[in-house]
Amino acid sequence: MSGGARGTATIVLAAFLTVAACGGPAADGAVVADHSHAGGGVVTHWTDAIELFVEYPPHVQGIASDPWDIHLTWLEGWQPVTEGRLTLLLRGPGGAREEIVFEAPSRPGVFNPTPNLSAAGTWRADLTLVARGTEYAIPVGQLQAFASEDVLPHDVEQPPPGLIALSKEQQWSMPFEVAVAMERRIPRSIPAAGEVVAPARGLAHISTPVEGLVLVRGPSHAPGDEVRAGETLALIAPTSLDDSYARMRADVVEAEREAARAERLFAAGAIAERRLEDARHELGVALAAFEAVGGVRPSTNAEDPDPHIYRLRSPIGGVISDRYVAPGQHVEVGTHAFTVVNPDTLWFVARVPARQAEAASEVRGAWFTVEGTSHAHTADRVVSVGSIIDPESRTLPVRFAVSNPGAVLKVGMLAEGRLLLGEPVTGVAVPTEAILDEDGLSVVYVKLGGEAFRRRIVQPGPADGSWTIVLSGVVNGEQVVAAGAYQVRLASLGEAEISDHGHPH
């Protein structure tokens, strides 16, 4: 083929003409070119594991073509195919056949065959990739081989305005993911802001019930350490003489001694039963006062090497979130010493605006995100629905129990989300992260071909945190950009345009 003839072999990326060719995975039927222009074409096709995007030039019988651009992308992780054996099989009229084998890509994700088709007419092209221990069959479809350069088509068609180009190389270099819009059942919802708090028994502010000195030889727990219920957090040597820990302990010892003596005298018939009951009562009062400050009954605390030292214990199991006292510090009665949180299950307290309080009776679950992350957390268990509107914020509190594996959620985090109401609604849904807010408009970017996208304004409906029903703007089966939508938006604001080979320039 002459240089002039090659110059006329322009290929315009026009995947918009055949959305069905890229409507979703498992399209194993006949594959047609997204567009055929000047004898060449562009095809986008998905299998269960791989996306094919190929741009091929026009072919003339008996002449090696310009290089094809075959782009292969793993759908999982949206990364280029970097290794594997690729076979391009072309079958033509009268049993004509050509097979081209690559042991590795020319560069990550790209293979560049130059077929020399021996007969004019319609050819069928198919790819076979052997990689990761599996053989993948990838149809390319039909293409035309022309009898001579003189009969090559010379039509020139420009892509319609508004098409956005983002090359495969750009897609591979950033977090990127495409999802198929599909029908889902999602509950109605109302927006609500709130915060993450600890349940009533999941948070303990531990104060010192005695005055004294925090001993250096005591435990050295620090924020982030896990503790068990009843575990000693600090040792305190009491210093007060009045109502001190040591005095209360001495009262218990004396009361126990008197109670034991009364038991013996009563058994011997030396005292009336009333004297025994009085001794037991005095012991009970002394024990109640001692145990109220965390004391352990002396007669059952044989393992304590120093019964006169107060042991400050954690009332719950969890993680130390704060420590306010240091070894050697003198503390007063009521000094805040530790805060312990059990992070396994927390509460999301949603604040429902008063004007929507009536709907709170229908709440069956919620999803929310917390500051600093876009990850959606779900809550299926409603703990309580408030019965009083807060007069200052004009909101109604609704509490949800939220499991917290990995302790990702922290007490005090601010949250925004939606409360799920009543029976689900059926409609075409897209991933929530695919919807961008652009100047007050809800926008998604629809993938029309391997490197072609279009901006669509949508009307969001019910959402469950992961998926959102769109009432208009996207149809069932279309592909939308989930991860990477913002980067596609940036590409739409640049100078990139779709040129001869479908790449932005």
Image (spheres, helix red, strand yellow):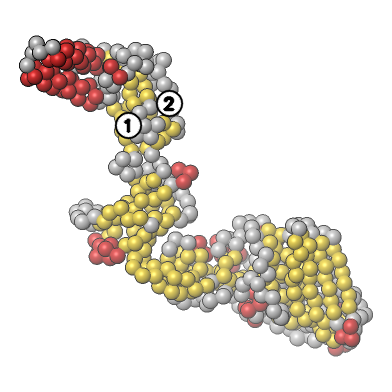
Is 343 placed above or below 14 here? above
Q: Amino acid at mark 2?
A: His
Circle nearer the viewer, 2 or 1: 1
In the rendered image, the residue lying farthest to the bottom is: 151
| Rendering coords of residue 202 (x, y %) | 34, 40
In the rendered image, the residue lying farthest to the front is: 268
**Looking at the rendering, in which quadrant would you find the N terminus?**
bottom right
The answer to which quarter of the image holds residue 159 is bottom right
Can residue 221 be seen in this snapshot? yes
Q: Which residue is mark 2?
A: 221
In the image, taking residue 35 as reference, residue 235 lies left or right, namely left
Q: Which residue is mark 1?
A: 315
Can residue 440 be seen in this snapshot? no
Q: Residue at x 64, y 74 (%)?
A: 22
In the image, taking residue 102 as reference, residue 386 lies left or right, namely left
Say few, some or many: other residues with alpha carbon within 10 Å of mark 1 (under 14 / 14 to 19 / 20 or more): some
Query: Distance of mark 2 from mark 1, alpha carbons?
Result: 15 Å
Say few, some or many: other residues with alpha carbon within 10 Å of mark 2 (under 14 / 14 to 19 / 20 or more): some
Please tell me which residue lies in front, 36 or 323. 323
In the image, taking residue 375 as reference, residue 121 lies left or right, namely right
Q: Residue at x 33, y 68 (%)?
A: 422
